[in-house]
Image (cartoon, grey):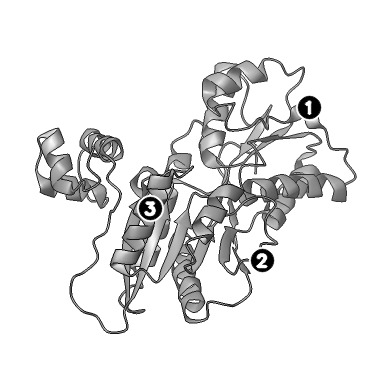
Amino acid sequence: MSKNVSTETIANYLNISRATVSRALNGQHVGEKTRKAVIDAAVKLGYKSYGIASNKASVGRRKVLILCAHPIITSSFFYSVTRGIESILTATNTELIQYADKHPFTQKDKRDLEAFIRNLKIDGIICFGYYNKQAIEDILSLHIPALFFDFDYLSLDTSTPCDIILSESINSMENFCSRLIREQNCRTFGYVGDWRHCRGFYERFLGLREALFLNGIPYEETYNITKSNKNFGYDPRSLYKTLHTFRKMPDCFVCANDYIAHALLSALTKMNVDIPRSVRVVGFDNVLESRRTVPPLSTFDIDKQLLGKRALLTLLERIDTPNMDTRLVYMISKYIPRDSTID
């Protein structure tokens, strides 16, 4: 498939209008079936750039590339973050271009990306969904100012100047678990998610363990489901099979994110577990889907548009002063109680 895939290519492939394709890719109103068809076709055909650099000469305008491991339109979290970035483009005299490419990169992928950056004269990169050490090293080898949303779980001591932005997890999760211990007499907690997947997942795991330590409660590994994402799908069927091996359920399951929590709720419901009276479940990120679970999912919210604004401003500072030390920026998370916990 040619790398020059456009909205017209997708429109011809699906036999629909270019306007419909553009609306679907930009989050405007189209039928859900049509939106899914457009997204699936965009991914299949290799459509990479969801923004188009202007051909008009703009003195002083910085060009920022969003490099994403998956198309932004498939993630409600990153879609909202991108809207925050877009809201201050005019005020910061910035142009935004989007480019999707999965990792691991092939040599051709890297050459294509390098050519894309060089041809458009990109000034800096915002990275969505690149968490493992090799992916980070590949991106930093491009020698262009970069900001990462989340990071490798153990590599915060990187000596290469870049910036990392994270949802605050340790304190918020510790406060939540400690409150369940004090107010609801919870004594056993399980963590669901691969804590090695990214720094955010790891810090939520640390927050849970910190709560147990501070309240004098032993940590019990047997309540956790922390298999590698590479070998274990966090879907209802896989979780259902694993939960059947448990001799006893914990008082609360802390999930690495809302998507994993959604799958866990489905598995527990299939087992006729009473949620939240028998088992409490909490997620993280407050994605749109968290409101539609049964029961509605308690979670932690981050102002995603503010997160996007902060990310762009941080990257622009990096572009202006490229040799600054690595910076780690945390955005506060807020607990959102719903029916999957007792409050």
Mark 3 vs mark 2, foreground winner is 3
**Which amino acid type is shown beneath numbered disc 1?**
Thr
Image label count: 3
Q: Assign the C terminus to one quadrant of the image.
A: top right
Q: Is residue 9 visible?
A: yes
Residue receiving disc 2: 159
In depth, the one of 245 and 216 nearer the eye is 245
Look at the numbered disc 1 and give the secondary structure of its residue: helix
Mark 3 vs mark 1, foreground winner is 3
Q: Residue at x 71, y 44 (%)?
A: 205
Dot 3 crowding, Cα within 10 Å, few <14, some 14–19, many 20+:
few
**Which amino acid type is shown beneath numbered disc 2?**
Ser
Residue receiving disc 1: 222
Mark 1 vs mark 2, foreground winner is 2
Dot 1 crowding, Cα within 10 Å, few <14, some 14–19, many 20+:
some
Per the rendering, the mark at residue 111 is 3
Q: Assign the N terminus to one quadrant of the image.
A: top left
Assess whether mark 2 and mark 1 are in contact (beta carbons under 8 angstroms).
no
Is 270 above or below relative to 110? above
Q: Quadrant of residue 325?
A: bottom right
In depth, the one of 341 and 174 nearer the eye is 174
**Which amino acid type is shown beneath numbered disc 3?**
Arg
Q: Residue 57: where, in percent of width, then height?
A: 20, 79
Query: Is 108 displayed left or right of 294 in the figure?
Result: left
Query: Is 117 displayed left or right of 293 in the figure?
Result: left
Query: Is 87 displayed left or right of 139 in the figure?
Result: left
